[in-house]
Amino acid sequence: MTQESTGDQVYANAASLRALVGAQALVSEWLTVDQASVDRFAEATGDHQWIHVDPERARRESPFGGPIAHGFMTLSLIPALLGETVTLKQRMGVNYGLNRVRFTSPVLVGSQLRARFEVLSVEDIEQGGVQVVWNVTLERQGSDRPVCVAEFITRHYF
């Protein structure tokens, strides 16, 4: 059973994060990936490949039937979706890295995505912080196959 989260979970210390190890997944709200967001990502990264930014050509020539979001755009949604799913009362938090990232299915523009977050581990680190490894699955509404799976590593200082 999955806990549907609306951002009302508050974690104010390392013990509260440790309690999530092996617990039910926390699930974000749905987010629509629109063409304007894809275009802004292309502008920010310089990746203007036509399968992302030319909807007409993508409909005609792409094997996906239309424009798709960049894989790295999809990946970049993870921190924001986590921030909307859990509230961390902390002095500071940082993204530390990713492991085992896979883009398992394309994200067609107009798709709705959500993320499932499962805590795999919480370890003490220097300066009184903790490092959390999250198993993240990004799902597309109406599909049985995830669009991205990754281990997301964060550091938190309470």
Image (cartoon, rainbow, N blue to C red):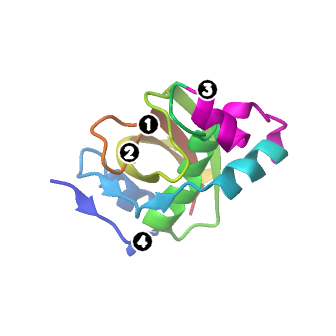
Taking the image as drawn, is residue 151 in sight? yes
Magenta region: which residues? 44-62
- Please tell me which of labels 3 and 4 falls first in the chain: 4
The residue at which mark 1 appears reads as 147
Q: Residues within 10 Å of mark 1 (few under 14, many from 20)?
A: many
Q: Callout 4, which amino acid?
A: Gly
Q: At which x and y percent is residue 83?
A: 53, 62
Q: Secondary structure at mark 2?
A: strand
The quarter of the picture where residue 13 lies is bottom left
**Circle nearer the viewer, 3 or 1:** 3
Q: Residues within 10 Å of mark 2 (few under 14, many from 20)?
A: many
The residue at which mark 3 appears reads as 61
Q: Is residue 42 shown above or below 24?
A: above
Would you say 68 lies left or right of 15 here?
A: right
Out of 122 and 44, give the one closest to the viewer.
44
Can you tell which mark lies on residue 139? 2
Q: At which x and y percent is residue 80?
A: 57, 58
**Circle nearer the viewer, 2 or 3:** 3
